[in-house]
Amino acid sequence: MAPPPSADLPLAQRFQRVASTLQFAWFTGHAMLLFCVFRYLLSWIRMNYYGGWAQFCYRFAFISAAATYGIVVYKTFRARQKTGAKQPGGAIGYLADENVQYLLMALVWLTMPQYPLSLLPYGIYSVFHVATYIRATLIPTFSPPQKLNPPAGASPSAKPQYIQHPVAETIGTFVKRYYDSSMSVVASLEILLWIRLLLGAIFFQRRSWILLGIYTAFLRARFAQSSHVQNSFAQLEARIDNLIGAQGTPPMARQFWDGVKGTARQFHAATDVNKYVNGAAAPKKTS
């Protein structure tokens, strides 16, 4: 029996083909996640979020999310293996990786009761991942950038200039304009989701306390890594301070809020992962 065509390819080309396949699977996963989020939101608007299609789309969205983040984690792990680099901090270091965090959280949401708000952060991330892949990979494949003629008198050694497809330019402008503001929205949604889980735990909803504990650990990790989450918490604190500081606010309310802030700061200090990862500061993320 003849060997498969890929067996005749040089090793570097085979690795490139595998990488391209994984990247396309990553893109497909994000595209499916977006479709499922859109379809679920339609059911939610019609108050039919426990219908067959709604439940399928909700669960499949998190299956897609787990697959996409799993691909990224796998590629990162393989890259470290090739270079012989070790993950700082061992197992705790892996848990400090934001892709691992979103992967694990997607698996948690997959097995827990429905919380529609939990879909939105993944959906927003997927919008930018899909847009970037279309701009950087799909459009150049079907419509390669056109080389511009050098101006008169240009140096022969000057770097050639290319013009992209107008759609690619539009997507690039969209990503640059809305990425930071969208990441701030994601951070606010993640904080709002924690408040929703806290209310569920107060009223003893099914698995609420377990989920609150897991999500608190996730949000604590996001706070350590994301400037957007830190800014969202700072804005929330400032708004509540203004409300509490208004005239006529009962002293008991101010004492309660001061107690909440004190407890939060103690929790922040006690759960500082930098103390356990070789004493090195975890890199700050902008997402």
Image: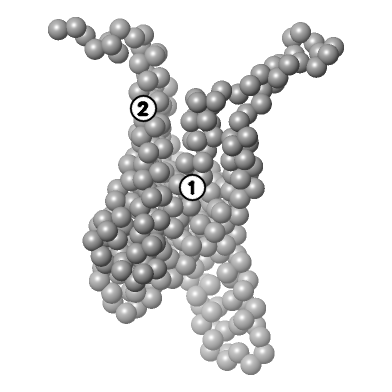
Relative to 99, 112 lies left or right: left
Residue 66 or 210: which is nearer the viewer?
66
Q: Position of residue 15 (x, y in %)?
A: 37, 19
The quadrant the N terminus occupies is: top left
Q: Residue at x 59, y 35 (%)?
A: 168
- Residue 5 can be seen, yes or no: yes
Q: Residue at x 27, y 58 (%)?
A: 53
How many angstroms separate mark 2 from mark 1 (CA)? 20 Å
- Residue 266 can be seen, yes or no: no
The tally of labels here is 2
Residue 127, label in figure = 1
Q: Is residue 193 above or below residue 271?
A: below
Q: Is residue 268 above or below residue 99?
A: below
Relative to 246, 37 lies left or right: left
> Which residue carries the number 2 mark?
21
Question: Mark 2: which amino acid?
Answer: Thr
| Residue that sits furthest to the right in the current view | 153
Q: Position of residue 240 (x, y in %)?
A: 59, 76
Q: Residue at x 24, y 12 (%)?
A: 4
Q: Position of residue 115 (x, y in %)?
A: 35, 65
Visual colour scheme:
one colour
